[in-house]
């Protein structure tokens, strides 16, 4: 699925800043981070809501946050809100809904770029290690990520 970072597109339903295929991601002026699917806007509230935007993980955390910083400067009204991107929900979606190691491995790359998130996701990572489909590579990466987090105290 193609991810397109775009200039803020203001509509009555929200300010859309990322297209993932036909799904738009952005901020609803009333309710915060939202998705627009088939013309219908819905608020992001659970990890499952993020399933449509998992391809953001392929771009990397640094690219996504660089885009968010540009937007926060271009549209100061939403500056702080745009920087409160629901990445924990995105990562939980990758770790909790996957049935292969692809999305979890991409999620761990995000965690490596932001180790402070590991403390919030430690339990989810430990559960992921126990999944029957989890490959040895995934289990080792999880173990390494958790160990690094303990060593740095994050």
Image (cartoon, rainbow, N blue to C red):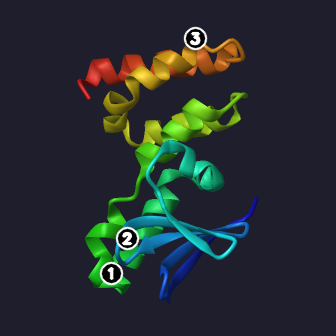
Q: What is the crowding at mark 1: few (fewer than 14 residues within 10 Å), some, or many (at least 20)?
A: few
Q: Is the C-beta separation of discs 2 and 1 under 8 Å?
A: yes
Residue 58, x across and y down, in percent: 64, 50
Kindly state the secondary structure of the residue where label 2 is placed: helix
Picture quarter containing residue 111?
A: top left
Q: What is the crowding at mark 3: few (fewer than 14 residues within 10 Å), some, or many (at least 20)?
A: few
Mark 3 or mark 1, earlier in chain: 1
Picture quarter containing residue 56?
A: bottom right
Kindly state the secondary structure of the residue where label 1 is placed: helix
What residue did someone put label 1 on? 73
Q: Residue at x 51, y 61 (%)?
A: 63
Label 3 or label 1, whichever lies nearer to me, is 3
Q: Residue at x 48, y 65 (%)?
A: 34
Which numbered tag is attached to residue 69? 2
Q: CA distance from mark 3 to mark 1?
A: 43 Å
Please state if 19 lies on the left or on the right of 149 as rendered: right
Quadrant of the rendering where the N terminus is positioned: bottom right
Q: Is residue 91 visible?
A: yes
Mark 2 or mark 3, earlier in chain: 2
Which numbered tag is attached to residue 130? 3
């Amino acid at each position: 699925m193609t991810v397109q970072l775009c200039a803020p597109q203001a509509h009555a339903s929200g300010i859309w800043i990322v297209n993932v295929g036909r799904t738009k991601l952005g901020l609803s002026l009333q309710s915060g981070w939202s998705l627009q699917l088939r013309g219908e806007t819905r608020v992001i509230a659970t990890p499952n809501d993020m399933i449509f935007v998992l391809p953001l993980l392929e771009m990397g955390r640094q690219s996504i946050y660089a885009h968010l910083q540009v937007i926060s400067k271009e549209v100061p009204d939403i500056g702080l809100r745009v920087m409160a991107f629901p990445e924990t929900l995105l990562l939980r979606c990758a770790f909790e809904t996957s049935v292969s190691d692809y999305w979890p491995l991409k999620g761990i790359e995000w965690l490596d770029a932001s180790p402070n998130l590991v403390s919030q996701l430690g339990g989810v990572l430990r559960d992921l290690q126990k999944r029957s489909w989890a490959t040895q590579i995934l289990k080792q990466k999880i173990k390494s990520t958790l160990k690094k987090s303990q060593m740095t105290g994050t």
